[in-house]
Amino acid sequence: MSSSAGVPVVMTADRTLMADHRTIFGGMVASSQTTTVPRALMDRLLAPPSRLAVAPLGLRRIEAALLGDGFSEGEIAIAPVERLREVIGPETRVIAVSAGEACGLGMNSTTMTAITGGEIYPRHLVRELMAQIAHLRSRAPHAKVIFGGPGAWQLVADDSLRRALGVDHVVSGQAEGNAAEVFHAAIDGDPLPTLIEGLPVAASAIPAIRGASAMGVVELSRGCGLGCNYCVMGREPMQDLPEETILADARTNVAAGLTSIGAISEDLLRHGGSGVNVRPERLMALLRRMREIEGLGLIQTDHANIISVAGWSDEQLRELRTLMVGESGARYPWMNLGVETAAGALLARSGSAKLGGVAPGDWGEFAAEQLRRLIRAGFVPMASLMLRLPGETEADVLRTLAWVERMSGEPLMIFPVLHAPIDGSPAPTRADLTSTHWRLVERCYDTNFREVPRVFFDGQTATGVPLARRLAMQALGYGQVALWSALFAWWGARAEA
Ligand code: SF4
């Protein structure tokens, strides 16, 4: 990769997106830390440099789009922050940065900073990355800095931050459709607008990746279309990627040494279906074909919907688990499901179709039953709750608190997050949380403190994380339990006062 002249197109991302995360859970935990955690623990334990050449899936797609448009492999370098010096030089014309967080406005970031204080690490590391790029730009006087990725919207909304970070152009949204055009224009010195709208391509035209993606993730689908008005995916209809693209991406990761992959979707259980309808046999047929890939270990996932669980029989859920776990030995595969609130009427007012045909008054119990079905099938559900949904009342919070207390004896995890508006209106902060909210948060974490260590350890074991690192992570986790328990009590008392 070393070149004193530099490589024409350099792509990079902050450390949390390019680190050695063997599991999706590991990546989530690292991205949830704030600067209250010592930096040395981030660098050595939570987000150490990857032993493999990995890049966020979004950058891999852009790389594939460029290669498909006539760029050669020698004209593109994907490098983590510590290797930028090797690839940025006088010949460099584009420095493309992908980030999940530029301003710390994402739901997870606002929640974690409200709970623990400090600055969310993804934002902190983006600022460090941009400072390093600013330093190296003196070697590459003709280079333009183009910023994209899931956090790009935060720079679209904040031009002074864009300038402060040294970003010339921001590309918002998916951009496989016009990335090559934009990069060619930047290389040729043609004028480009500061804000560039990315052009997506149809799922059938999404190019297969050419190198390993962080955490081995492969997209099964894009979009969701269920219409929750607090979610950018709400109006993006779900589109499945072609099976051949999914399988090619999985093979690329396994061949690169990422043998445990992440099958990601906004709703795994709706893959192969249409609209809100599920077709379990389609997903299972795909997973059976994946299982034919030699060397494939654990198949992890991230999201699914409560209403989609209801469309699967108990037997199908058990078969799904078998297909995902394979021979990896994993005992506690998890799946994240947005329950959001036990107050169904509040959820319905959010414009969500998550309830399906469920009567709002029945939502809490319906969601609880679907989670119990997943548990009986051998999964560990990770339920998420949303605090401060617009219109939320004290009665709504009490209802959800009672729901959490009823569920707390089950083997599951429950993560509360703060509602984060996507229309630019101010996000709730710690000051907006009442003592009832803090009781709710405490009850959720009573469950998480019990369940997260075993699920985390299990996933790391199944994906080959060395024992020393697993034990160090467990020790760190116990330290955080003590700290967070004290913080919950402190903030709860402050809210009461
Ligand atoms: S179901 Fe989930 S992904 Fe879909 S619109 Fe609602 S919050 Fe977004």
Image: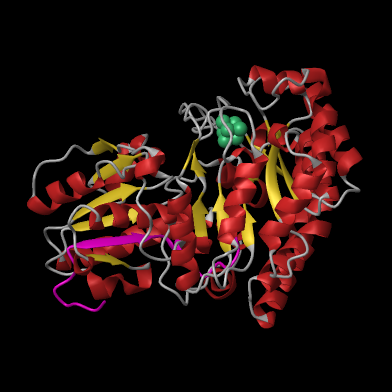
The residue nearer to you, when weighing 232 against 392, is 232
**Does residue 218 show up?**
yes
* Magenta-colored stretch includes residue 15: yes
* Drawn side of residue 150 relative to residue 48, left or right: left
**Does residue 302 show up?**
no
* Drawn side of residue 270 relative to residue 81, left or right: right
Quadrant of the image where one finds ligand 1: top right
Q: Which portion, as a residue range, is magenta? A: 1-23
* Magenta-colored stretch includes residue 30: no
The residue nearer to you, when weighing 132 against 206, is 206
Give the tally of numbered discs.
Answer: 0
Characterize the magenta stretch by its predominant secondary structure: loop
The residue nearer to you, when weighing 421 against 364, is 364
> In which quadrant is the C terminus drawn?
top right
* Residue under the point 44% across and 52% down: 244
* Drawn side of residue 86 relative to residue 142, left or right: right
* Residue under the point 58% across and 66% down: 260
